Each structure stands twice: as C-alpha cells, then as structure tokens.
Amino acid sequence: MKKKYFLFVFALAIAWLFISPAVFAQYEKTEESGDKLAYVKQQPYETVKVTTPAGKVVKNVILMIGDGMGLTQVSTAWVANHGNLNIDNFPVIGLKRTYAANKLITDSGAAGTALATGKKTNYHSVGVDTAGNSIPSLTDLASEKGLSTAVVVTCNLSDATPSAFCASNKDRDNEEEIAADYLNCNVDYIFGGGRNQFYKRKDGRNLFKEMEAKGYQVCFTWEETAKIETGKVFSVLDDGQLPLYPERGEVFKDATLHALSLLSGSEKGFFAMFEGSRIDDCGHWHDIPALINEMADFDQTIGRVLQWAEKDGETLVIVLADHETGGLTLLGGDISKGEVKGHYSTGSHSGIHVPVYAWGPGAEEFAGIYENTDIFNKIAGLLKLK
Ligand SMILES: [Zn+2]
C-alpha cells in the first residue's frame, strides 16, 4: 500500500509539472485579452513619502488630470503596484460630480470645460458655454494676471482636455479650428502630440511658423525641448498622440518637470495643467495591462511633482479625473503579487462621481462633495483670478 501511495503522489507530482505551465500560461494569455483578467509580473516601482508644508499661502497651482481615472482605476493601479501609490500621500480627498449641461454621461470636452472655465457646457463642446460663446479658462485668466502657465498632455493638443484650456469650439471634432486657437492662448509651456492638425491642414496654413512668429520656440523632439532654459515652449513630439507608456519613454515625467523648472521663476506664480491623457483609451479598449502601465506613468509623475512641491512649499497640487471610463470593476487579485482581476461594463464613459486629491497650501478647500465646476471656482479663488 505504501509503495502504491508513493507512486500515486509521484504521478501527481509529474502531472503537476506538465499542468502548472498551462495554468501559468493561462494567466499569460489572459493578460493579452485584457478584458476580464490580467496578471502583471512587473516589479513594483518605488513611491515617495512627502511632508505637507505648514502655514504657507498658495502661490502656484498644479492641476493633474487622469483622463477617465475613476476610483477603480486608482485602486487597480494600487493593487498592481503591490499596495503602494504616490497618490497615497494626499491628505485631503473630495468627490466631484461629472455630468454635462445636457447629458448625464459626459465626454472629456464638457468635463474639461467645467474644470477649466467653471461652466457646465454641452456634450462635445470645448471652452464655450451652452450658447456657443467663448469663455475664458484658468490659463487665460492666470496669464492675464501675469502668472505663468503650462499645459502638458500625452494626447493630441487638439484633443478635448487641452482644448478646454486653450481653445473654444462647439464641437471638439473640429480639430483644425481648435489647433489654430493655440495662436491666441498665450500659454507659456505647451507640450503634447498631434502635429498633423498644425501643418497638414485643409487651409494650407503652417501653424508652427505662426507659433514661431508669436515668440514660441517650436520643437519636434524631446532632445531639442530639454535644451530650452527660458522663454516660451511649443513642443509637439508626434504626428498623432504620443505612444502608450512605456513605449513613449519618460517624456511625460520629463516635460512635466521641465515645465516646472521654467515656470518656477515666475514672480507672480503659475498655473499648470498636466494630463495623463491615455488612461481614458485603456478604458475604451478594456485593456487592464495598458491601464496599469498608463497609471504607473501618471502616478510616478505625481511622485516627482510632489517632491518638487515639497521643496517649493507654496504650491497646491490637485489630482483628479474628468470622468470615469469603461465602468471598471475590481473583482479580485492579490496585492502581494500585483495581480488584478477586473471587468469593464461599458465601452464608453460612466456617470459616477470621481475622486479629487489635494496636497499643499489650500488643500482643505477640496474636501467634500461638489460639482466639477467648483474646481475652477476654488482654484480661481485661491489664485485670486476673479
Ligand atoms: Zn473617453
């Protein structure tokens, strides 16, 4: 009997040797499908711990937007990074309603316009009210008051979120018209993708030449951009949007830190908007591994920004989403392995409240439950823009 038992266990062990690669291979395969199950083997990245400066007043505001980054996207990133995020540093949390003027489920155009201008507008509108009138954004108002400004994104500059800050149009799809609005936006540091809308145009204009005539240093590579130590920057690194992380490299972090170093000389302070634009795409595609990569780049950038702000002492940092994308649910996983199991419920956006994280002087203003338009009101109030 003993010998039989031994043989049985031995046979089981041999069988497991053949079965186990299949079990693990299944995980590998599901990572590719991305829809309902993802297994992430990547090593977790290091996070930072920062101390909130006490007793200072707000001189600068950094608004970091994770496009489509609902609470589940943040939770998913947290599990995938083995239970640590730079976002964990934020002491003040709020919840923000996201609906548009004419629709419960917003797009990034109406959502970005609410953040940038303090007005709810129609689905697909950017930088205009519901009647189609152009309305000033935080970057317009800050620049009029003598503050420096920056807009750094990983999508096309003519895409919805940057357009809400830099352009005015009833329809976000009029990307060539939107691109032309950059000539009048006066933002000091502009970085993103989407060259085509600036020079392969139906009207034959080359907006890069026109931006140069306006005093911008126009760059098409990161190497050129990084050399700039002063003056206005217009850096467009790709014909379309920038590739997904990690394929695009560290340019989002680098451009964010570069913008901060150029803006920090501003006597009256600055307002900067940095967007992790492509978190939204992952929701539309139902791609959890891509989401984890995009969230890693965004959260690592948050860590770098917080370290910068800790040294500066007079900078308020706000991290939020314009809306949630994909109706993502976190269904299981393992924190110690960085394993995530999730499920998407829509190919579009969802209508839930999204989190607002605030750190630094003035942060306490962002506690509570409020409208997306209140983000504008709070920032404009703290920077005395109104
Ligand atoms: Zn979207």
Image (spheres, helix red, strand yellow):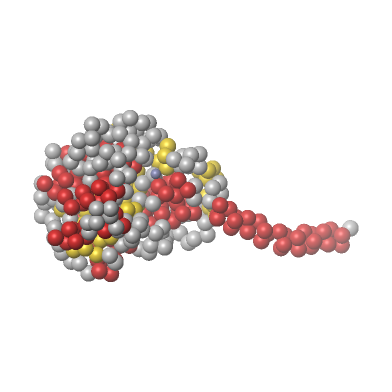
In which quarter of the view is residue 93 placed?
top left
- Relative image position of residue 134 (x, y in whole percent): 19, 39
- The quadrant holding residue 362 is top left
The answer to whether 35 is drawn above or below residue 258 in the figure is above
Looking at the image, how many numbered discs can be counted on the residues?
Answer: 0
Q: Position of residue 184 (x, y in %)?
A: 16, 50
Where 30 falls versus 363 (above or below)?
below
Q: Is residue 56 left or right of residue 327?
A: left
Q: x, y percentage for residue 154? A: 33, 55
If the picture is divided into quarters, which one holds ligand 1?
A: top left
Residue placed most toward the observer, 122 or 273: 122
Q: Look at the image and tell me whether residue 75 can be seen.
A: no
Q: Residue at x 22, y 51 (%)?
A: 180
Name the one closer to the observer, 183 or 56.
Answer: 183
Percent of width and height locating residue 293: 44, 56
Relative to 219, 330 lies left or right: right
Q: Residue at x 36, y 36 (%)?
A: 106
- Residue 189 vertical position relative to residue 91 in the rendered view, above or below: below
Occupied quadrant, residue 242: bottom left
Q: Residue at x 37, y 31 (%)?
A: 104
